[in-house]
Image (cartoon, coloured by chain):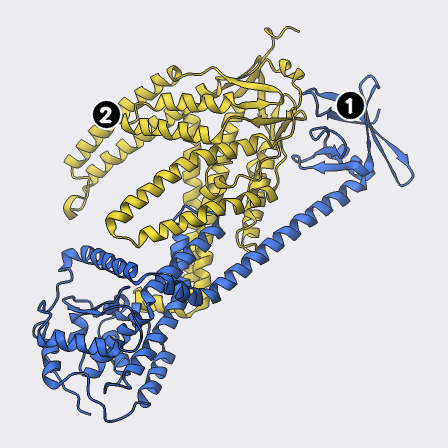
Amino acid sequence: MGIAGRFHDGQVAQVHVVGLEYEHAGATGTLVIRDEDGVELGRWPATDLYALHGRKDELRLGANGQPTGARVVVRGRVDVARVLATLPVLHAKRRQQAGREIRLAVTATVALAAVIGAYLYGVPLLASRIVGLVPPAWEQSLGETVARQMEASLGDSGGLEACDPDPDSLANRAIARFGAAVLEGSGSPFDLDIKVVKSEIPNAFALPGGQVFFFSALLDQAETQDEFAGVLAHEVGHVAHRHGMEQLISTAGTGALIGFILGDMTGISVAAGLGATIIDARFSRDAERQADAFAARAAERMDFNPAGLADLINRVGADDEFARALALLSTHPLTDDRKAALEILSQQRPTGLEPPFTATEWAAIRSMCGEPVAGTTPKTKSK
Amino acid sequence: MSSVQEQPVPVVFTGTRSELAGMLLRGYGLLIPTIGLYRFWLTTWKRRFYWANTEIDGDPLEYTGNAIQLLLGFLMALAVFVPLYGLFFFLSTQSSEAAIAGYSGVAVLLWFLMGYAIYRARDFRLSRTLWRGIRCDQGGSAWGYAWRRFFWSLLVLVTAGLAYPFMAASLWAYRYRHSWYGDRQFGFVGSWKQLARPFYLTYLVVVVIGAVGLGMGSAMGGLPVSGATPTVGGVVVLLIAAGLIGLMLLYYRSREISRMFSSVRLGEAALRVTVRARSLLGQYLLFGLALAGSYIVLAIGGLIVLGVVASGAFAGGAFDPQVFMQALQSSITVLLAIIFGYLLLLGAFSLMVELFLGLGFWRLVARGATITGLDSLRTVKARGEDTALAGEGLADALNVGAY
Ligand SMILES: [Zn+2]
């Protein structure tokens, strides 16, 4: 009798203890399966054989043309080695199968990498296209929701109380007029709503839908009209370009992609958040550049220096390390090349323009949140 | 021999932890260059390991599924998830009330879909399980199962958990009464009565311990109420209460597993499973130790790496978040180090889960199982093919099912 094995015919749940023999016929041969009494239970041509995955030191064979469950099982390192030596076709078939799977895995990986690549380069483009499809009314209501949430979260530290609640005050009218003048000609569907609010964090930002918040702490640190107008024009640029909405869409897209990679579409996982932040940092740098350029274009119509923006950001940063981490820089990273670009933009301005605010207006704006911090007396434009 | 006199046959598990660990480590390594796609292969290898090492009466199970089926299933599930994700995104931009209503709606929908996914995944696994050359299968309707599970869970919610034994028994019965081995249908003889005693006992004890523990703990100031720092004594009481509740839950789980598995029949063959609560506890303790150990090693390694690549942030002995964040954004090395570190943490966690909870649980059930009347199965015949299933689809995307 040949090598001992177990045989299942794939039709009935029987187990046959069998002996396996190999009949050579030229280059190939046949596996003959006989039970203990020598009765032949099956003849499997070697070319039809394939190996299945079993545990260690166990060889499971199936054969084409046989019931799918039919198996010959050989156990023990020595016996398995003997069968494999007799049947080199098994090696070849397994290599073939492995090759097929590897090719498929590589193809799928390349496809996924292509999707990611297309995403990285396409999303800023795609996001701005999709933003074009978002109804302005929707974006506006979204902005209001965000503002409410923000107010709720800042509720115990004073909320977002407006410095000057009267919309017809000199300061508010001047700010609204400036905002409208900056936005003019951009074709933006939004009406600006610029609020100067009380907060100890030196920051300013634009929400989707036209709301711009300017925190009193930042206003306190602004020494010139240029700085205040520069930051405001920059924020209006974010509104005009609908960056808030764009960011939201790209974040959602990044989350979906990372969920896909990790295979966990439901888990709002840490990875998705982390990944989204890192990838989105790229988009936000593009957005900053666009908003700077927008502010510079506005500075061609009114007499303020867009580079004042950079001065203010620098001053806030020099003041307090912690505030810096938390505040303006974190939402508006100021890189050296951005600063340089602002300087160049500020040098190409025409002369003989009107300043954005009159001296009295600027004084009113400066004092709208109460007395500014001692030592920084209001200055009007000296140029 | 007469089948009445037949000795119960123990199920044997032959796999080792180190074998599984080697396979998993190699798999995790391959996940990186394949951007995560290797997970379908890894799952397949893992199942081959579990199936092939589970031996019943001298013959191991065989898992006949392959990775490509899983990959296709996942791609099909995306068709459901991409619109759902879009809906999720849309809701997140709505006013708070609308968003909350919408989120709840999506959560309920997911809960319902999970039932469907669980059943389909079980179908996929069973129909790719071979023993003695004969394939298992699952009939029934996945939607029917999803509805049952959904309405039962509503009832459990309404009754503050008291209806749970009825739900568990009903779902176990549905699963097994629609399962097949070849042309022979599984049966299920269990009922809620077998779960009632351990469940209501556990329920009562958990409620009492919970109430007493919470009462005592908060009286001793263990809860951080209105910004006050919790007292040591109070925290200890709360922790003891939580530990006791955990023990009770393990006790109940061991009873449910043992009694429900022991109610599974296949013609004249009967399964009997004994899993002890202390064995379950042992698995969790071992898992906790292993996880803590691996995280300590990773933390030490991580600090060293971080100190090298982002030394600026730690300059002067103090941690500077701003410099750190700036280093983060500017330096690709730091970025890679952080991503790599995160992947290591994730990898260590899932490795320990698989090695100590996954393998541990499978081994406990397999080694606690005996089967009587196995000889009666020698007449089971094969049934036709079940080719309708391409992967587990939804189940993979929803992340259900442990094996
Ligand atoms: Zn900006």
Give the crowd class for mark 2: few <14, some 14-19, many >=20 residues within 10 Å.
some
Residue that carries the numbered disc 1 in the rendered image? A18
Horizontally, residue B201 falls left or right of residue A282, namely left
As displayed, is residue B293 above or below residue A254? Answer: above
Decide: marks 1, 2 in contact (CB < 8 A)? no
Residue B23: quarter of image = top right
Q: Nearer the viewer, residue B190 or B306?
A: B190
x and y percentages locating residue A216 in the rendered image = 15, 70
**Point 51% across, 63% down: residue:** A118
Q: What kind of residue is marked 1?
A: Val
Q: Nearer the viewer, residue B271 or B246?
A: B271
Instruction: Specify the chain shown as blue.
Output: A
Q: Quadrant of ligand 1?
A: bottom left
Give the crowd class for mark 1: few <14, some 14-19, many >=20 residues within 10 Å.
many
Instruction: Specify the chain shown as yellow.
Output: B
Q: What kind of residue is marked 2?
A: Val
Horizontally, residue A160 falls left or right of residue A123, namely left
As displayed, is residue A329 above or below residue A359? Answer: above
**Residue at the farthest right position:** A26
Residue that carries the numbered disc 2 in the rendered image? B208
Could you tell me which quadrant the N terminus of chain B lies in? Answer: top right
